[in-house]
Image: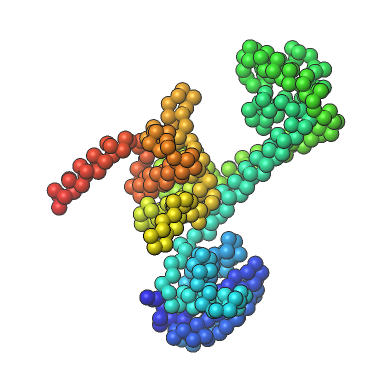
Amino acid sequence: MSKLYDLPVIGIDIAANFSVATVLRPNGDIFKKNFRFNHSLDGFNSFLELFYKAEEEFNRKPKVFFEFTGIYHLTLLHFLVDRQIDANTINPLITNSNKNFNIRKVKNDKLDSYSIARLCKFDDVKTSVYTSKDMLSLKLLVRDYYKLVDLKANAKKAFSNALYIYYPGLQKAFTDISGKTPLAFISKYPTPNDLLGADRYEVISFLKVSSHRSLVWATAKFGLILKIASDAFVLGINSATFTSKVRRFVSTNNFYEQQRLDLLDEIKYLIDSVPFSDSFNQNISLLMSFKGAGFISAVTLLTEMNDIANFHNANQLVAFFGVDPSVNESGNFKGDTNKMTKRGTATGRRALYALALSSIRKTKSGVPMNKVLYDQYHIKLKGKKKKVRLVAIMNKLLRYIFSVLKNQKPYVERDPRIHQQMFVNNTIKNNSAA
């Protein structure tokens, strides 16, 4: 049952440049409908006038509800919170499933604001947790970081595809064409002609110095590249434009890399300057106790979940990240091709995915990064599809993360049988003490 039966409620449908509000009386009747205001200081102040008018009319502060819309709702949300107004955001999935109360197929801002107010007035709707300005700024910086990473990756992919046309086979010589040595090499010898016309010992010396590797390695690498260049001279399109394409790629790659490093420094600076810096840095250290978890992965997971106190159990955290399985059942039918919901944070899932991949791999010395998760992926779940196994690892990691952050203790890799025995012993001890 709704807890708002004696309060006025305001539902707001938010667009990019304006919003439409509907005010309901405590009894559910309409007090003010289709009040439109622009997303400007004057517009927000006009909404405040409506809010205070409703407060004066009913001698109660109205509760405000609107959908979170990515970014468009943020300025209004913080504007209202700064003025101690109870503003709440709700998941659009909730409102979308309840907008069909009208049998007519109608979709407009006026009806949407009314349906939001009506839904939140009469139903016990779950609202999203408020994110402080500092945490929001940090979250947006982290998401900008990933956008830069993607831009750099796209530039690399486009250039790698160009190599198939102008310099076929060069990918075989370098695993990562955007690495330090490959970039230096392709800048100095951008075309097969440039390499074929260069002095052998000069190229070998260049490779040795640039890579900080042995003379034997540099000589072998030169032999491979020379064969590739000889073939590419015949197979590739020997165009003078490729030299300029190489220069543009090197310049673009270096620009994005510098922007990435600058943004990383900005993230670190902001973390150290926010009011919650001590606890946040402590949580970063806790997450980095997982082998394979780097600084940016830890920060991403923390900013996306906002505060572990918002989650009462591990299942809620799993659902928030969208790695819980969907359910498709009706009567006696039970679907067996259910996928994960993916309704949670996509950015958080990205960091979690990277951590899961690291956890099921081995180090250069052949030792599993995480033996428990490695065995689960490669042995216990061997008969299942790769995606299914990886989602299971992501699910398990979130449960570990929940425990680590709740207990404020670093992650300890422990055999499940030992962990189970410890749980039994602790249960017996607690029962005896009671």
- Write down the quadrant of residue 334 in the picture: bottom left
Q: Nearer the viewer, residue 222 or 6?
A: 222
Quadrant placement of the N terminus: bottom left
Picture coordinates of residue 313, whole percent (x, y): 35, 54
Q: Nearer the viewer, residue 51 or 166?
A: 166
Picture coordinates of residue 428, whole percent (x, y): 17, 46
Q: How many marks?
A: 0
Picture coordinates of residue 331, whole percent (x, y): 39, 63
Please say if 151 is above or below 78: above
Please say if 77 is above or below 352: below
- Write down the quadrant of residue 231 in the picture: top right
Which residue: 46% across, 81% down?
A: 8
As drawn, the residue found furthest toward the front would be 332
Which residue: 60% across, 81% down?
A: 34
Please say if 376 is above or below 141: above
Q: Is residue 89 visible?
A: no
**Colour mapping:** rainbow
Picture coordinates of residue 302, whole percent (x, y): 47, 49
Judge from the rendering whether residue 151 lies leftward or rightward of residue 407; answer left or right: right
Q: Is residue 380 visible?
A: yes
Which residue: 68% across, 28% down?
A: 171
Which residue: 40% across, 44% down?
A: 396
Judge from the rendering whether residue 17 lies leftward or rightward of residue 238; answer left or right: left
Please say if 382 is above or below 218: below
